[in-house]
Amino acid sequence: MAHSDQQIQLEIKNLTKVYEGGVQALTNVSFNVHKGEFLAIIGLSGSGKSTLLRCINRLVDPTAGSVVFNGMSVTGATDEELRLIRRKIGMVFQHFNLVSRSSVLTNVLAGRLGYANPAWSLINRFSDDDIRLAMTQLERVGIADKAGYRADELSGGQQQRVGVARALMQDPEIILADEPVASLDPVLAHSIMQYLEEINKKDGVTVLCSLHFLDLVHRYSDRVIALNNGQMVFDGLPSEIDDIKFKEIYGKDAERVG
């Protein structure tokens, strides 16, 4: 077993999160992620998907348990160590998290400084290399022509492409995508998922993506983790989600659609 361990990029052990007021968002969640996997995280709204992703990069501090990334403890990291770790973990948000009044280019450049640093917008000084790289990422997601537009002038699908380009600016080893297509039309959902798939397959970037729709899970993911009420109820292949497992994940009254 030992020699396959170098393939393990992320180790989640007994992850537990209790929010103020006693809301138990996660209970003893444990799993490993191998380098280059496309892992879907599914479950009803409120099942803990978003909390789980945010615990991985410590946008949310877990109550108990550990997260280890590339052999480094994320949960035990100092502020300085955390900054270095976060550089390698890109994040794509459901509601895009762009600075709406800034230009598309400036939003993408923000990825160079890590998404948790609000000071970048005050400095706004980026090297020519960074600007070239940002334009390359915008070309990759098909919106280089929008570089000078304000972020809030773009459609939802275009804004999410900016979000993907910003995550790519970090040269990430992992991308955490928190319901990246939940606020988009199904047609646009596929276009965003295809970018994530390309980044995963071509660049070898590991993707952890929370999703609502099983058809997207079947189409894009190698492996699925399901949460129900903060507990992990499934870890396996998309094809293994039969009707019984489906009811365990979504509840006995849930109906499959399509």
Image: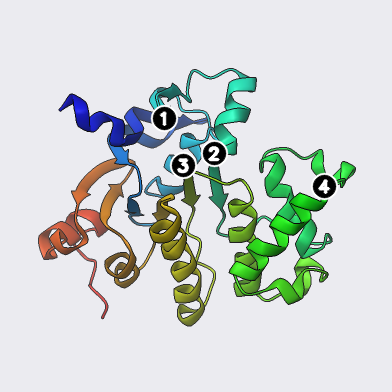
Q: Which mark is first along the chain, 2 or 4?
A: 2
Disc 3: which residue? 51
Q: CA distance from mark 1 to mark 4?
A: 29 Å
| Quarter of the figure with the C terminus | bottom left
C-alpha distance separating marks 1 and 2: 10 Å
Left or right: residue 133 versus residue 61 is right
Q: Earlier in the sequence, mark 1 or mark 4?
A: 1
SS class, disc 4 = loop
The x and y percentages for residue 93 are: 57, 55
For the N terminus, the image quarter is top left
**Numbered mark located on residue 127 in the image:** 4
Q: Amino acid at mark 3?
A: Thr
Residue marked by disc 1: 70
Q: Is residue 192 visible?
A: yes
Check if mark 1's residue and mark 2's residue have beta carbons within 8 Å: yes
Q: Position of residue 234 (x, y in %)?
A: 20, 48
Structural distance between the alpha carbons of marks 3 and 2: 19 Å
Q: Are marks 4 and 2 in contact (CB under 8 Å)?
A: no
Q: Residue at x 77, y 61 (%)?
A: 105
Q: Is residue 208 above or below residue 191?
A: above
| For the residues bearing labels 3 and 2, Cβ distance under 8 angstroms | no
